[in-house]
Image: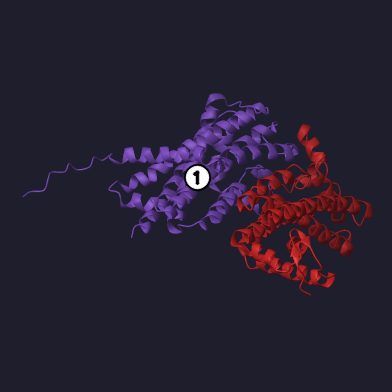
Amino acid sequence: MTAPAVAPPSVFSWVPLALALGRRSLLGIWRIPAAMVPLLAMPIFFLVAFSGSFSSLLELPSFPTDNVVSWFAPFAIIQGSAFAGFGIGFATVRDIETGFYDRLLLSPGSRIALLVGPALATAARALVTATAVLMVALVMGARIPGGALGLVMVLLASMGTAVISAGWSLGLVFRMPNQRSGPILQLVIFVCTFLSTGTVPLADQIGWTEPLARLNPLTDVLALARQGFVGEVTWATTWPGLVALVGGLVVLWTWAATGIRKLTP
Amino acid sequence: MAAAVVGDRDVGLGARAVVEQVRALGLRSIRGTLRQPQVWLPGLLFPMFIAAVNTSAMGKAVEFLPGFDGVDSLLDFLLVASITQSVLFGGLAAGTDTTTDIQTGFFDRLLASPVSRTSILVGRLMGASVTGALQALVFIALYGAFGVRIAAGVPGGLLLVAYAMVLALVIGGFAALLALRTGSAEAVQNMFPLTFIVLFMSSAFFPTESMEGSYRSIASHNPLTWMVDGMRYQVIVGLDWSQAAMSLSWTAGLAVLAIFGANRALRARLRRAT
């Protein structure tokens, strides 16, 4: 007796599962209202609070704009996007703790789907964050002299940052699959976003933060996102941001991909 | 003296017994907090990190921007902000621990024992207040090591500690109120973003003189601004009893309000329990 012939799986057989996981992750936002807090409430609050509290910072010599909302809106978007990635990591912790992830790992689907699905969902979440913050920023009087290209740059930076952050979050969650990973995830994201040019340009920083902000790749990503808000989009500002995004994606998604193997018994 | 406790009333407990119970429950609260570094450590580290970053990144502000008269370093300006931030975050632990007591049944066991009802609340708040004092001392010592000198000297330092203790009663009281009303740790934790908003929309991190428009108006009318400014005066300018009185009276007023609300919530819960 011969075994029934089974067609070899297509190279792209993981795509439907990845899309399904991405869709499930997005539905989770609506089903768990608390998930909206880091996604929307926090970045909008930071935009309002920073623009209000630190409005006079624009009087410092190196600020490239006289519009405080234009300065802080891209920072709020990038920070919110980074927390969108954190949200994916934390949702995965819940799936691991409830046993749902075990069932995914036991299913015959490709592991690639378990990584691509959350990545797609994170990019979509970041788009929601960026759109909401942009709308609030425009109402508050933000200007975008870089025009449509400036908007494309901030959306690109937003989605890139979110996917990088998801890579970091998933990599850690796969290695520390419990709620205790939450504070570490948040702390690293907070430190990375604050040790950058988020609030003050490099030239106006004094002391120990200046060299760290200069080395932080997020500074280049922020410049990529912010250029259309403070002037014209230029290739000289764009390419370092793109390099930072690609570098971050490669390093942190390698970290995530090697981490998922640790979950498999 | 063992006394009977009826409904939500304390019956026949001597003052000495009540004080002893407050002391025991207060010590339990402090020990409970100290045993959970994950509860109090972020409340210390996060304000330190924010202050360290802002001092470096925004350090030029004291030279160029209005509202920083007499300020040598942004760290001087941020000392009171850090204490306030730390106490506000740490004070939430009083509420969270109360919900834990409710959920684990410890609260019911307390009710079944001849313990003064008042001491349940006062003990918890005393614990939060002492923790607030410890937080203030840590910040004064650490920032002192980085060159921050309190212009009002030792009396100024004592005023800061007193401010932290009363502020802990404010946040601890409101957190206990929520905990007793809902019994839900999640509801208490939801106060966290609110404290963040109140903190940012005040002069804690930047002077109101450097703000603009409606944001400046909100910050100028935020009681936290008056509380912080009165204490900051002791750090930047020097000892001034009227400034200290303004700050402490607002803080104490809010503390009375919070404790009154928490006490009512406690009585309501006791009535439901009997």
Q: Looking at the picture, does residue B89 appear above or below residue B209? A: below
Q: At x 48% / y 50%, what residue is drawn?
A: A169
Tint applied to chain A in the drawing = purple
**Quadrant in the rendering for residue A200:** top right
SS state under label 1? helix
Residue A230, given in percent of the width and then of the height, sits at 63, 31
Amino acid carrying label 1: it is Gly
The chain ID associated with circle 1 is A
Image quadrant where one finds the C terminus of chain B: bottom right
Residue A32 visible in the picture: yes
Residue A187, given in percent of the width and then of the height, sits at 58, 53
Q: Looking at the picture, does residue B132 appear above or below residue B258? A: below
Farthest bottom residue in view: B1
**Quadrant in the rendering for residue A63:** top right
Badge 1: few (under 14), some or many (20 or more) residues near its Cα, within 10 Å?
many
Residue B145 visible in the picture: no
Q: Looking at the picture, does residue B27 appear above or below residue A203? A: below
Of residues A63 and B193, which is closer to you in this image? Answer: B193
Residue B100, given in percent of the width and then of the height, sits at 62, 60
Q: Which residue position holds label 1? A: A85
Q: At x 76% / y 70%, what residue is drawn?
A: B21
**Quadrant in the rendering for residue B221:** top right
Q: At x 49% / y 44%, what residue is drawn?
A: A244
Of residues A186 and B38, which is closer to you in this image? Answer: B38
Tint applied to chain B in the drawing = red
Q: How is the image coloured?
A: by chain
Image quadrant where one finds the N terminus of chain B: bottom right
With A215 as the anchor, is A107 left or right in this view?
A: left
Residue B50, given in percent of the width and then of the height, sits at 68, 52
